[in-house]
Amino acid sequence: MADQQARLSWRDGSIPVSDQFDDPYFSIHDGLAETEHVFLDGNDLATRFASAAEAGTDFHIAELGFGTGLNLLAAWRAWETAQEGCAAPSVLHFTSFEAFPMATDEMARALEAFPEVAPWAERFLADWGGTGLCDLGTLCVTVITGDARVSLPDWTGAADAWFLDGFSPAKNPELWQEDLLAAVAGHTRAGGTAATYTAAGFVRRGLEAAGFEVTRTSGFGRKRHMTKALLR
């Protein structure tokens, strides 16, 4: 699959919908609350960020599906909150794999819906420029464009936590295949975690086959269940 930019439509003028996958980028009810419930709480990041701040250690999040950057901003806000009072703040490393990157102006438009993260959005977008790399002191971002089935196995990094945020498995099955989930496990540190909004059986079985301990838990909004995973 060749690299190409995201094609969007806008629902109610503020919710971006992927024309490639006919799926919205975030919940129509409250995308930020969904991110916090699924990805931050699903990976127990408040506790883990506090531990990292106390120990003075960095933390690495990896993600399938960068989208609008909302997940990044929610995590960065939580990270900086945990770092308050630290004499020498540690760094949150954030690596995302995205096949169809969104134009910066469209990211900015989408993020206007979330004034709670506006200070972080402004800092990020001012330095971003769509280059794939961004160093903001407490945050170091790398977005790897292209098919994750190709790029992830070649990645040399390892994550403490994964945000599995591809479009719906029914509409984007390539990003939920067993071999890709095995690559996620292969790039996860021992004791690392993953979380996703979907509780689809084949996704949970793929994570289990990759070596994760999988838990189905309460989902966000109208989604009854979501999935958390732990790599021993």
Image: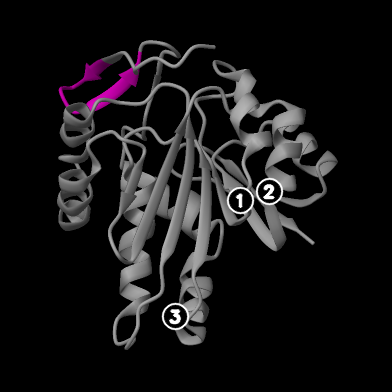
**Residue at 24 percent of width and 42 percent of height:** 128
User: What residue sits right under mark 3 in the picture?
Assistant: 53
Three-letter code, disc 1: Gly
Q: Earlier in the sequence, mark 1 or mark 3?
A: 3
Three-letter code, disc 2: His
* Disc 3, SS: helix
Q: Which residues are magenta?
A: 9-18
* Disc 1, SS: loop
As drawn, is 166 to the left or to the right of 70? right
Q: How many marks?
A: 3
Q: Residue 51: horizontal and vertical position, in percent? A: 52, 80
* Disc 2, SS: loop
Q: CA distance from mark 1 to mark 3?
A: 21 Å
Q: Residue 38: horizontal and vertical position, in percent? A: 50, 49
**What is the quadrant of residue 147 in the picture?**
top right
User: What residue sits right under mark 2 in the picture?
Assistant: 187
From what the image shows, is residue 43 above or below residue 97?
Answer: below
Q: CA distance from mark 1 to mark 2?
A: 6 Å
Q: Which mark is residue 157?
A: 1
Depth-wise, is mark 1 or mark 3 nearer the camera? 1
**Labels 1 & 2 near each other (Cβ < 8 A):** yes
**Residue at 20 percent of width and 47 percent of height:** 127
Depth-wise, is mark 1 or mark 2 nearer the camera? 1
Asked if residue 114 shows in the view, the reply is no
Closer to us: 224 or 204: 204
